[in-house]
Image (cartoon, rainbow, N blue to C red):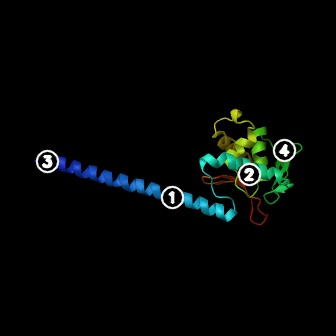
Amino acid sequence: MAEHTLSARLVEIESMLDRSRRRFEEGSRLVEEAHAILGEIQQALIGAPRSASPEDSEEVASRLLASLKASGSEMPETLCGGRLSVDQVQRLIRIDGHPIGITEMEYRVLELLAFARNNVVTRAMLLKHLYRRADDQPQPKIIDVFISKLRKKLRNASGGAEFIETIPQRGWILRDVDEKSGA
């Protein structure tokens, strides 16, 4: 009799685990959908183009980079409410007037973000900007490393201000905010 009770209890526990797994998977799916919708809403709010399929991302990146260069838009003397300045001649950045030491690659990441200010810059765009030839390109995750290091240096130099914002599943943006709303 004890074996029958134990066996029945085991079936009940397996059933509970199966229901829990299905609920977890459904919850994960809902979170992913909400994350995607949030990204689309953020894109719509900033007026950036909708996301491209992975097959089209390199072509889209090329077109966006070409349009940035062709527009002849110049980088302003200051960004982020005047807190961030980029000296293109000396390839130097300053936070609140104080120079910040960054690497050449970090400078080039910031340079593209500054030129595209208020627009999303994708991983493909950064790879294309940093590595001119496709056969020179390292693993795409290197962009995360450059962004992370650059953010840390900017945050430390500015007393914790965040200048570079991540747009989920899209890329990054340097918002050129006014002084009243902060950096």
Q: Which of marks 3 and 4 is nearer the N terminus?
A: 3
Instruction: Give the percent coordinates (x, y) of residue 128.
Output: 72, 42
Q: Earlier in the sequence, mark 1 or mark 2?
A: 1
Disc 1 residue type (three-letter): Glu
Q: How busy is the neighbourhood of tag 3: few (under 14 within 10 Å), some, or many (20 plus)?
A: few
Disc 4 residue type (three-letter): Leu
Q: Mark 1 points at which residue?
A: 33
Secondary structure of the residue carrying numbered label 2: helix
Q: Name the residue under label 2.
A: 64
CB-based contact (under 8 Å), mark 1 and mark 2: no
Q: How busy is the neighbourhood of tag 2: few (under 14 within 10 Å), some, or many (20 plus)?
A: some
Disc 3 residue type (three-letter): His
CB-based contact (under 8 Å), mark 2 and mark 4: no
Q: Mark 4 points at which residue?
A: 92
Point out the frontmost of discs 1 and 2. Answer: 2
Instruction: Give the percent coordinates (x, y) of residue 153.
Output: 73, 45
Rounded to the nearest angstrom, the CA distance separating label 2 from label 4 is 25 Å
Q: Which of marks 3 and 2 is nearer the N terminus?
A: 3
Point 80% across, 60% down: residue: 81
Point out the frontmost of discs 4 and 1. Answer: 1
Q: Mark 3 points at which residue?
A: 4
Rounded to the nearest angstrom, the CA distance separating label 3 from label 4 is 76 Å
Point 58% across, 61% down: residue: 38
